[in-house]
């Protein structure tokens, strides 16, 4: 009974504090709260991805696709694209990975298609010709980062940590979420609603972890109440699924999507 009273008090405290506490002002690291799951990385590149071994040595699960188009069973089969929904970070080359579908724009159009299908995934371009993105008038808000094919391994891994930080650092996670919601033209009112829930879940998780020594799995169910205050129906009009938005709001409980 006493434990339930403490939890209710923590929930009330987190809800009140979230009104004026922003993710940028919460000093914590998701790694102390995460359930242990490896980030899943998808590489779309028609050439061998030279950093694959380095990423796997860091503990990431890496899958390379040599085309954005899935292999055809026959020449008469309709062209289909890869299903990337299970991945957390997608690195996509901008040349020769989708030319059978997007003649003239190729990987740039593929990136736009991936972003449309997966509005809240972390997506980066990987290319030896970054200027091509500007030539194609690619909106900056579509991508989360641009990687150069010319980087050595240390430079690549250093820059890749900026994407990993989205899953570990509250400030980076919120900046990512906000950017993605703004790209989808979600209203400021709805974005603030999401921000409140994000802050509330983070504050509550800290309390349960520090005061009651709960694990991420133990704390999981207590995030659901705050998330019910988000208008999922309105967000779904922007292509956002309930599963995806809630997984991003509580990475501290579930680790990855």
Image (cartoon, rainbow, N blue to C red):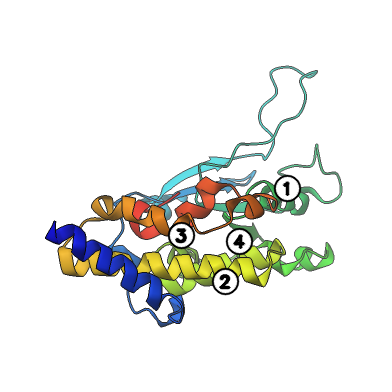
User: Residue at point 76% right, 20% down?
Assistant: 77
Residue corresponding to mark 4: 149
Quadrant that contains the N terminus: bottom left
User: Residue at point 32% right, 65% down?
Assistant: 11
User: Residue at point 20% right, 58% down?
Assistant: 4
Local crowd size for mark 2, using a 10 Å CA cut-off: few (<14), some (14–19), many (≥20): few
Circles 2 and 1, Cβ within 8 Å, touching? The answer is: no
Q: Quadrant of residue 176?
A: bottom right
Judge depth for marks 4 and 1 and give the one in front: 1
Provide the secondary structure element on which disc 3 rests. helix
Local crowd size for mark 1, using a 10 Å CA cut-off: few (<14), some (14–19), many (≥20): few
Residue corresponding to mark 2: 192
For marks 3 and 4 on the same chain, the one whose residue lies earlier in the sequence: 4
Judge depth for marks 3 and 2 and give the one in front: 2
x and y percentages locating residue 147 in the rendered image: 60, 64
x and y percentages locating residue 181 in the rendered image: 63, 64
For marks 3 and 2 on the same chain, the one whose residue lies earlier in the sequence: 2
Q: CA distance from mark 3 to mark 2?
A: 13 Å
Q: CA distance from mark 4 to mark 1?
A: 22 Å
For marks 4 and 2 on the same chain, the one whose residue lies earlier in the sequence: 4
Depth check, front residue: 94 or 197: 197
* In this view, 47 is above or below 134: above
* In this view, 47 is above or below 187: above
Circles 4 and 1, Cβ within 8 Å, touching? The answer is: no
Residue corresponding to mark 3: 249
Q: Is residue 51 visible?
A: no
Residue corresponding to mark 1: 113
In the figure, is residue 169 to the left or right of 129? left
């Amino acid at each position: 009974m006493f434990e339930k009273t403490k939890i209710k008090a923590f929930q009330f405290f987190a809800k009140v504090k979230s009104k004026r506490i922003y993710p940028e002002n919460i000093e914590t690291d998701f790694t102390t709260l995460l359930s242990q799951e490896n980030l899943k990385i998808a590489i779309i590149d028609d050439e061998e991805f030279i950093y694959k071994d380095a990423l796997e040595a860091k503990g990431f699960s890496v899958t390379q696709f040599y085309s954005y188009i899935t292999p055809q069973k026959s020449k008469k089969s309709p062209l289909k694209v890869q299903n990337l929904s299970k991945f957390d970070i997608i690195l996509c080359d901008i040349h020769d990975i989708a030319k059978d579908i997007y003649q003239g724009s190729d990987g740039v159009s593929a990136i736009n298609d991936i972003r449309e299908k997966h509005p809240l995934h972390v997506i980066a371009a990987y290319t030896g010709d970054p200027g091509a993105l500007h030539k194609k008038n690619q909106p900056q808000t579509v991508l989360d980062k641009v990687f150069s094919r010319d980087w050595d391994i240390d430079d690549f891994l250093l820059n890749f940590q900026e994407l990993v930080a989205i899953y570990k650092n509250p400030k980076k996670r919120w900046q990512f979420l906000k950017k993605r919601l703004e790209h989808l033209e979600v209203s400021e009112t709805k974005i603030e609603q999401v921000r409140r829930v994000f802050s509330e879940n983070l504050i509550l998780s800290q309390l349960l972890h520090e005061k009651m020594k709960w694990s991420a799995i133990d704390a999981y169910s207590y995030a659901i109440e705050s998330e019910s205050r988000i208008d999922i129906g309105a967000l779904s009009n922007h292509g956002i699924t309930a599963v995806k938005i809630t997984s991003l709001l509580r990475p501290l409980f579930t680790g990855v999507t």
